[in-house]
Amino acid sequence: MRNLAAETTDPRSELETARSAEVEVGACPICREGRLQRDIHTWQVAVRRCSQCGHHVATHELTEITEDYHQQYEQGAFLESLAITRGRQAETILALLRRLLQTADDVLDYGAGRGWFLDACRRAGMRVAGADTSTEAVSSLRARGIPAFVVPVSARDSLGLSRLPFRPRVLTLLDVVEHLPPEGVSDMLGRLLWEIGPQLELVVIKVPVADGFLYRVSRALASGSLYGPIEQLYQVGTFPPHFSYFTRASMRRLIDRHALRVLAEAGLSEIDRETAQGRVASLRRLPPRLGRVAGTTLSLLAESTSKDSVIFVAAPTS
């Protein structure tokens, strides 16, 4: 899901825009209290870190790419590996939803991508819909019988929720907000909550985190001028890439700002033993047998240490 931050005329957005304008240049766009300090610098991306909440903000040396974002990523083994991981994560997220709200239904996946999460929701008997900036993604969802709409590009348009066949009770944003310019993340979330309305019961946000195993290893390699892994994590060369890496603290700040209360958090691994070689670019360059051994080792370490993504489930406080 891409390019969702925009302005609107609803009251929440006007207030959020006003608050954003008060943030000093060099201040963290998420917590708005700490200062952004130099952290990582490669030829293609410069990363700064908030001194207060630890949020990481990336500036890319990249011009906009007009090609549908689905076509910018590797296909084949990478995509097959990603599908396996996303399927496993979907089951974990659904179990968490059922624990918190046994009657969880009417799910809108905003930034649905290839629809792997919505497929899992449908198998669980839920009513679902999707939205995405990619026309290819939306066409694929509709072909599978899932209601879906293209998120409008215009900064002044509604987000398009009036086209849904139902009003969502559950909103999911999975691997979405890190692709937004950081100064627009809070505004977009506020607009979504305002347009959905009071029937919303749960908000689910999944983001990559900077204290995860893969990020920490990649950052250490970058300090030794081995930039490939950290540039892959920030999705250098695609548009929009990753503009943010969150921390639990920075996401809690964002959630609290929108009158949401965190009910649960859960760490998620981003690679599996059988798919690590397909996901990690540097492993694919190794001889097949060595790549498999290295992939298994990497996945075991990732599973046993800090998780690379965190899922936050929150509910409106009112």
Image (tube, rainbow, N blue to C red):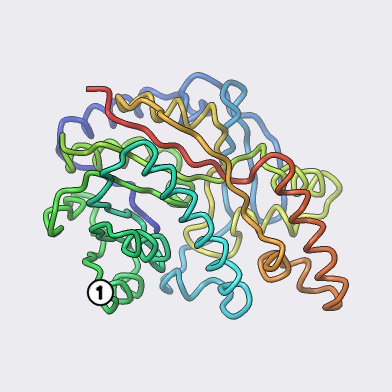
Where residue 88 appears, as percent x and y from the top left, is 53, 59
Q: Nearer the viewer, residue 247 or 52?
A: 247
Q: Quadrant of residue 74?
A: bottom right
Q: Is residue 96 above or below residue 73?
A: above
Q: Which residue corresponds to the image point at 70% horizontal and 68% vertical from the top-left? A: 274
Q: Which residue corresponds to the image point at 15% horizontal and 58% vertical from the top-left? A: 164
Quarter occupied by the C terminus: top left
Query: Dot 1: what SS?
Result: helix
Q: Nearer the viewer, residue 62 or 73?
A: 73
Q: Amino acid at mark 1?
A: Arg
- Residue carrying label 1: 142
Q: Which residue corresponds to the image point at 19% horizontal and 37% vertical from the top-left? A: 194
Q: In the visual, does 275 lie left or right of 175?
A: right
Quarter occupied by the N terminus: bottom left
Where residue 85 appears, as percent x and y from the top left, is 57, 61
Label 1 packing within 10 angstroms: few (<14), some (14-19), many (20+): some
Where residue 8 appears, as percent x and y from the top left, is 19, 42
Where residue 68 appears, as percent x and y from the top left, is 41, 72
Q: In the visual, does 90 lie left or right of 17?
A: right
